[in-house]
Amino acid sequence: MANTRKADGPKTIGGYEVDGELGSGGMGVVHLARQPALERRCVLKALRRELANDRRCAERFRREAKAAASLQHANVVAVYDAFTWRGTPYIAQEYVEGTDLARVLADMGRMAPHAAARIALEVARGLEEVHARGIVHRDLKPANVLLGRTGDVKIADFGVALDATSSQLTQTGQAVGTPAYMSPEQLRGERVDARSDLFAFGATLYEALAGCAPFQNAEDDESSLLRRIERGRMASLRRVAPDTPRWLARLVERCLRPRPGRRPASAAELRCELERRLGTPAPAALRHELAGWLWDRDAFAHLGSATRPATPAAPRPARRWVAAWAGAAALTGGGIALWALTSQLEIAVRILEFAATH
């Protein structure tokens, strides 16, 4: 998240105290705010006043709130509320103190493969939940992957999300999203499903590893970009980023196949592959490792007064008396077993001697 600017508007919006403006875009303005009732910081997204009466824009804004609110997952930005204040629609959502993947890549150029793979695992976990709810994000890209200062990885911005169960939101002939990360079927304006998000996942991971989007060319227009994607014309990942492990390059290339049927079957498949290769890291351990990597590279320098999270304490070694007790128990157990075996042999010998004399 960017540094805030002092808000020019009202100090209070609904039940939220506004601290300042985080940024603005074509459709809306984003404020950093505080919810006094629950004593937590949050983000307020407002639809621009000039668009509030545009039925199509208002519906898209409402759809974003509804789609995100249906998701409760550690790797998806949470939505707290949706309301209208003085004629302007607002969405209140989770505040992630940190940065986003696009800003990290702009500063660093590209990421180390082990860090990129761990971010990819968290995104795959989030996408798995998104798709399980019947939602297609349609705008997954580095700018929509938030990285918290404590190592959190969260998918954001469901402004063009598609409810796959709704016939009203599946018209063809209209491409929505960010072209450099869109699947060929999405660029053509065709009906899309979860596999289109997997293409965007591959494009995002490629950029994290290589420092550039796989198909985009500065001179390309949308039609030439589509031809490039349809023909699979991209530089080999291991050629532009030789330190990328072969298995990770293969995973990216599978996601970027032009035909949806040749891509991985689901985000769950991606998640399983990444967990298998990375040793199934626990979420807390993964967050700590990723936070340390980002802090070491000044990814959160723009936060100013934010402090680095404390390093978790190492597991305490067993006390000496516990180890001694365990050793004594082992020796005692061995002695008992030896005594029992000796007694059984003595009994067997006596039985044989008795049989021989009678």
Image (cartoon, grey):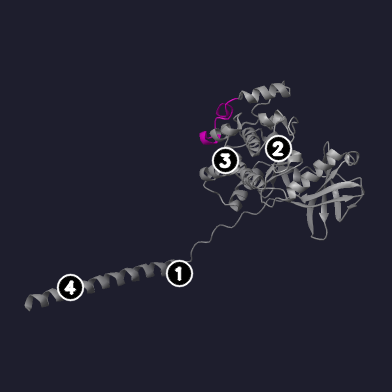
Dots 4, 2 in contact, CB < 8 A: no
Q: CA distance from mark 4 to mark 2?
A: 79 Å
Q: CA distance from mark 3 to mark 4?
A: 64 Å
Q: CA distance from mark 4 to mark 1?
A: 41 Å
Q: Residue 61: image x %, image y %?
A: 81, 43
Q: Residue 138: which disc?
A: 2
Dots 3, 2 in contact, CB < 8 A: no
Q: Amino acid at mark 2?
A: Arg
- Name the quarter where the C terminus is drawn: bottom left
Dots 1, 3 in contact, CB < 8 A: no
Q: Secondary structure at mark 3?
A: helix
Dots 3, 4 in contact, CB < 8 A: no
Residue underneath mark 1:
321
Of the residues under marks 4 and 1, which one precedes in the sequence?
1
Q: Residue 114: which disc?
A: 3
Q: Between tags 2 and 1, which lies in front?
A: 2
Of the residues under marks 4 and 2, which one precedes in the sequence?
2
Give left or right: position of 6 versus 272.
right
Assess disc 1: are there few (<14), some (14-19) or many (≥20) residues with their C-alpha within 10 Å of its C-alpha: few
